[in-house]
Image (cartoon, rainbow, N blue to C red):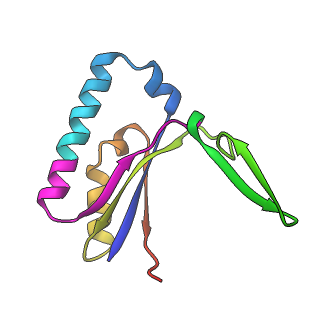
Amino acid sequence: MQYMLLIHSSESAMQSAPQDTIAKMHAAYMAYTDAITQAGVVVNGNRLRPTSATTTVRVVDGKTQVLDGPYVETKEQLAGYYLIDVPDLDAALSWAARCPGASYGAIEVRPIWTM
């Protein structure tokens, strides 16, 4: 079954973090990516650009609204994701707990609803 691991973290904390902290986090993510790749469970994954690059689209009363920036202000922002294919939720939760983002923010684990 496929699960999306949505990585939520504080964008402002990352922007103000010392370079050595950023380098350690980058190394941890590379090791994690290697681990899930070697385990054969990763389908895809990417880091997202900052919220300043976000464009939000809504349709209200039949009219399209396009707004620069995220729709909501939150303490943590969606920073990236991994799409994994594992046997069950327990396996997905295990991989989520190993993700470096779990130590710096939160990992939302959501099953994919195949259409």
Is 22 one of the magenta-colored residues?
Answer: no
Instruction: Name above or below for residue 99 compared with residue 27.
Output: below
Q: Position of residue 90 (x, y in %)?
A: 30, 70
How many labels were placed on the picture? Answer: 0
Would residue 3 be found to the left or right of residue 79 on screen?
left
Instruction: Name above or below for residue 100 compared with residue 4.
Output: above
Q: Residue at the left extreme?
A: 38
Q: Position of residue 94 (x, y in %)?
A: 27, 60
Q: Residue at the location (66% across, 39% down)?
A: 69
**Image quadrant where one finds the N terminus:** bottom left
Q: Which quadrant holds residue 22? A: top left
Q: Which quadrant holds residue 29? A: top left
Q: Position of residue 35 (x, y in %)?
A: 15, 52
Q: Position of residue 24 (x, y in %)?
A: 24, 27
Q: Residue at the location (40% across, 20% down)?
A: 17
Instruction: Name above or below for residue 52 compared with residue 93.
Output: above
Which region of the structure is painted magenta?
Answer: 33-51
